[in-house]
Image: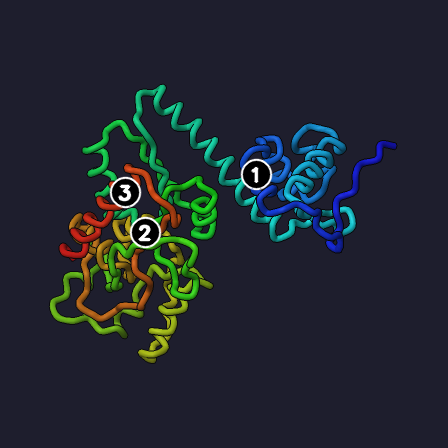
Amino acid sequence: MVMTPPCASIAEPPLAVSPEQAESFVMRRMSLRHLRVLLALSEAGSLSAAADVLHVTQPAVSKTLAEIEQGLGQTLFARRGRSLRATALGRRLVLLARKLEAGLARGGEDVASMVRGASGELLIGSTNVALAQVLPDAMAAMKAEYPCVTLSVRTHALSELFAELRSGRLDMVIARVPPDELPTDLESLCLIEQPEVLVISAQHPLAKVRGRVSWETLSEQAWIWHLPHTRSRALQDRRWQQMGLPLPRNVIETGDLILTLNLLRRMPCVTIMPMHVARVAAQFGVAVILPLEASLGLADLTLWHLREPQGELVERFKQLLHLAAQQAAHQA
């Protein structure tokens, strides 16, 4: 049986290495091999599983971990049975490894873009509330100035977008974030306040009625409603309770504004959406904005990026997003 060096336990004292020596090790001696072992251990949770991921032997993984821990003078992974758990310093180094890995991948993508004749790339994360007007306007303006810059837009769940931003796989995220979920480690720029308005399909019979339609009458119509267990849904349900009205029974539940706009085009229904999106729908004859107060008090559309100096392309795109948001707010 091959014996492997045991991983340090949680009670093992740190090795006697000065902060200067530890800093020197990180700056001069840590290699891609070290970083990849850290990532594999963090994700796999054991020496044997990490070895399988890396297609190396378990002793090789154990030896590499020992090199890092001796160089830093600190325990990076504590053993719990057969599993490993990163210490506070271990988690910090894993985060650094992820950022460096993302940087390498990003560098490869940049090189590939240059080979294709492109002159740079912007990686943008966005929730769908920005997709109707603000983001497309800014992208069109960016392409007019930098036609050979590749613009890549990702639309995942908000938590995934922020994780990709922190790891360096995105340059920015554009989203509405509830006040109790604000990421304090990121820099923010408010783009546009987004009061909600009441919208009805242009084809709906009530859209052509002169005078104000009552909430009671509207509640009996087909509705596009926010998804359960979301902040938007909770605020919308609460508004109906405050008005003393039963919730609509004829509903389609979705959080996708693109789907909502397509449904408004295809069937007579009612919904509540941000003003600047509703204005776009009205411009294209898809919907009519009704003159009833419908604001739910949701968060503003905000741009998020890392708290570190940004490149020229990122800074210019931030400016163009701000201009697009100002125009959207003025038109609304």
Q: Nearer the viewer, residue 240 or 323?
A: 323
List x then y, in percent, for residue 60: 72, 31
- Residue occupied by mark 3: 315
What secondary structure is found at the residue carrying circle 2?
Answer: strand
- Residue occupied by mark 2: 303
Distance from label 1 to label 3 (Cα)?
33 Å
Neighbour tally class for label 2: few under 14, some 14-19, many 20 plus, Cα within 10 Å: many
Q: Nearer the viewer, residue 209 or 153?
A: 153
Q: Residue at x 43, y 29 (%)?
A: 107
Disc 3 marks a residue whose amino acid type is: Glu
List x then y, in percent, for residue 152: 35, 36
Q: Is the N terminus in the top left, top right, bottom left or bottom right quadrant? A: top right
Q: Is residue 47 above or below residue 258?
A: above
Q: Residue at x 44, y 49 (%)?
A: 162
**First in sequence: mark 1 vs mark 2:** 1
Q: Nearer the viewer, residue 48 or 242?
A: 48
Question: Which is in the foreground here, disc 2 or disc 3?
Answer: 3
Disc 2 marks a residue whose amino acid type is: Leu
- Residue occupied by mark 1: 24
User: Does the image show residue 326?
Assistant: yes
**First in sequence: mark 2 vs mark 3:** 2
Neighbour tally class for label 1: few under 14, some 14-19, many 20 plus, Cα within 10 Å: some
Left or right placement of residue 4 versus residue 297 in this view: right
List x then y, in percent, for residue 278: 22, 56
Left or right placement of residue 40 versus residue 237 in this view: right
What secondary structure is found at the residue carrying circle 1?
Answer: helix
